[in-house]
Image (cartoon, coloured by chain):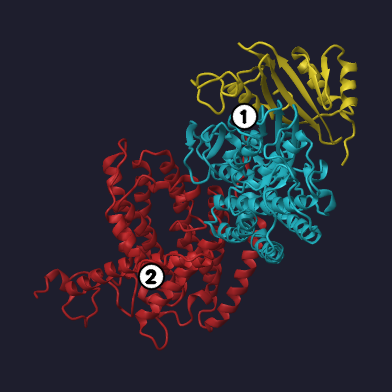
Chain colours: A yellow, B red, C cyan
Amino acid sequence: MTAALSAEEIISQLNDKFPGAVEEAGADSVLVKSDSLLAAAEYLKTAKGLKFDYLNYITAVDYYQYFEVVYMLTSLENNHSITLKVRCYTRDNPTVPSIRGLWQGADFQEREVYDLMGITFEGHPNLKRIFLWDGFPGHPLRKDWNQ
Amino acid sequence: MVIPDFALNAPLAMQVTPADWPGGYWWHWLFFTIIIIAFVLIMVMGVIYIERRGMGRMQSRLGPNRTGPFGLLQPVADAIKVLLKENIVPATADKVVHWLAPIIAFSPVLMIFAVIPFQNGALLADLNIGILYIIAVSSVATVGVFMAGWGSSNKYSLLGAMRNVAAIVSYEIPLALTIVGVIIFSGSLSMNQIVVAQDIPYILVQPLGFLLFFIAASAEINRSPFDLMEADSELTAGFHTEYSGMKFAMFYLVEYAEAIAMSAIITTLFLSGWRGPFLPPWLWFLIKTLVVFFVMVWTRTTLPRVRIDQLMALAWKFLFPLALVNLFITAIEVIFWPDISQWIFVGVNIVIAALLVILWSKLFKIGWGRLEV
Amino acid sequence: MTTTRELVLNTEPFLLNIGPVHPSTHGVYRMRATLDGEVVIDIEPVFGYLHRGIEKLMEERSYTGCIPLTDRLDYVSSMTNNLGYCMAVEKLAGIKVPEHAEYIRVIAAELQRIANHCLAIGAMLNDAGALGTPFFYLWREREKIYDLLEMLCGQRLMHNYMRIGGVSQDMPEEFLPALKKLIIQWQRFIEEFDFFLKQNEILIARAKGVGVLSRELAINCGISGPVARASGIKRDLRKDDSYLIYDRFKFDIPTGENGDCYDRYRVRIEEMRQSLRILEQARKQVPEVPAKAELPHLVHPPAGEAYAHIEAPKGELGFYIVSDDSIAPYRCHVRPTSLINLTALREMVRGWKVADLIIIFGSIDITMGEVDR
């Protein structure tokens, strides 16, 4: 099955609805500002023609100047997908709004990002460490973590 | 040897020794006690071998074949291993209850064998209430199991023991009712008389009764598909999780001895016990018991396990009404046509059994569904 | 069917730890279940017992050196893990795979799918209490698949076979005739196995209607693979986001309607049949050209990022790789199929009993290596 909408069309729709939220647009990914993440995600989920009802994965990458949280969304009925990215520039207590309320699949994955990268998700009902034990020092997947 | 007064002039129940037995009452008692204990212990080893090897072959693997020729000494190896193991008791367990439980579970099983006829007149005590004695005594083993579950101070054991008690109590009733069906035909409660009265084996005359009895017996002795009391994949061995060494051996023994006991009872009640041409009667008895046990192993290997509420639903909604109907039909047959040949009953009963089983299984639903929590 | 429960007795719920060491938890998985008698009220999963830091380890190894690490993710089906990773790196570096290698990859992946479903179905039936009989039959057939895979790469389990740009070595000459023989044997076996189990009363009573996962919840949680297809989501990455050469083969996507354990079981059986179809077509179409593109020894993709996903036997397995123009990945994230499939477990088991909890958990088919990484 071919994709219904290409990434540029989706990004341009997003840009029209939320002007100023989109910082960068890549080939198939879009970088949004962290405070408009929830609104953009909800729009993507519910808007007719977009209908991104399936969350593929959430992960985070540590580029030394910032953390980048990557979300990939797919629409099952239209069969197109888009990658959303959010950056946080602090290293001490980076926070990003949680999308668990929209997609329940974010539950364990956001806990994993919190556990291994140390990014706090506001609004997550049960944000505790998932793989490591509670008193574990530090967040291992960060680039500056040494055991 | 001086025969005590009370043996000579005793009330009826004690004069169980056949008049021509050499040596009188006490030699008879000693001989049969030794025979029964030897029989049970050796047969347990034999059936453990049959089960493990039979189950292995049915699962397209080999089963034990290293210890001794064809793995025949495997149960001996198991027995030695279990005797040499350390006896671990959990620290918070109730010591007395924990220690008593295997004994209370095992003794009734041995007692059942006192009234099972190996040959015409060859039993420890030819009680004229034979089958009633069996039903009464076999229920005591439940107490032992429950003590084991409680005394282990382990939630898994407790869950297993509770399931066990609920199931055994429920299955007593269809068990007893189908036995009454047999008794109506044979006219006597004594086990020996039941065998003597079976010109046609009762499995043909009472097919529905046999089926119900087999299912209820399998549930009573915790064999698959009703072995959720010791469901390995759910509760890591249920009520005997915390037992090791000789006590575990007792529970293991109980399971197989009860299986042999039930097979022997089925043989006596339904397959005409020791009767048969050509071979000596005790050999017939042995062969039939082993065949019944083999069928039990067969069902164990083939079927998955039922859930506890499905188990209870099976007992109360399926077996109990069918046992009542069976009893009713048997009673009508015996009262209204006491003189006609039993082969007519065979035909009629087989048709009725088939109809009832098919009808009933379409009519009711097993188990609850999901509960609202 | 749900029933409301009036608490006639005053009971209090207790906490049962279905611990990391348990015969049925498919690895080291711990659930803290709150039970009210037999009914599960709540479960809280505890992960991390097999966390090895694979994602961090990948940052220190070369791209080719990460392939053995991916074997150990879903240790039951290593070929598909390798495939996903290699596809992600090839997408990042823009490497094109020769056609002969693509055919070998498809054959290896479909063989792995059949082998994985053998384990999934066998383990689920083992949890249901079928004491290993279907498990052993499936395992016997899985050994035949292992023989073929051993012919390809020399290893039975941790294959480490795919390389970036192709496969590590070509098929030996005896591979295709052996594959032909295996397909014939397997087609007969699947019919026989399905015939045994499809109408088994006890399996239907245990699995039908149990652990229903609704379509909406499945989509919201991001469930993929046979679990999602059994709930009615008709999504299979081999058709929806076609990779390798799957668009040349004709096969169907089996879906279920109710999303209960029985549907998940049937979907897996049907998928095995469809995999055999793909294997038959692939076997006939394999071209005769060398297998591995000529690549430098150390793969050195340009800076950038790529995500590639495949339809692994358990669901959508994806690899998100970020590269910074060095010989090791900057960041490699594995989309954990089993962890995401477990998101809905809590909703699926509430209100069912302990025995159902075990069978529901078995029907989701997870591997802790993928959950914990």
Q: Residues within 10 Å of mark 2 (few under 14, many from 20)?
A: many
Give the x, y percent position of residue C45. 56, 32
Q: Nearer the viewer, residue C16 or B216?
A: C16
Q: Are both tags, 1 and 2, on one chain?
A: no
- Asked if one can make out residue B365 in the rendered structure from this viewpoint, the answer is no
The quarter holding residue C54 reads: top right
Q: Nearer the viewer, residue B128 or B160?
A: B160
Mark 1 falls within which chain? C
| Left or right of A37, for residue B120 | left
Q: Look at 25% across and 73% down and name the residue there.
A: B16
> Three-letter amino acid code at disc 2?
Leu
Q: Nearer the viewer, residue A107 or B187?
A: A107
> Three-letter amino acid code at disc 1?
Glu
Which secondary structure lies at badge 2?
loop
Mark 2 falls within which chain? B
- The answer for how far apart the CA atoms under marks 1 and 2 are is 80 Å
Give the x, y percent position of residue C13. 50, 31
Q: Which residue is mark 2?
A: B189
Q: Which residue is mark 1?
A: C59
Give the x, y percent position of residue A80. 84, 33
Residue contact at pointers 1 and 2, CB within 8 angstroms: no
Outermost residue toward the left in this view: B2
Quarter of the image where the C terminus of chain B is located: top right
Which secondary structure lies at badge 1?
loop
Outermost residue toward the bottom in this view: B278
Q: Nearer the viewer, residue C253 or C88?
A: C88
- Asked if one can make out residue A4 in the rendered structure from this viewpoint, the answer is yes
Q: Look at 46% across and 47% down and name the residue there.
A: B163
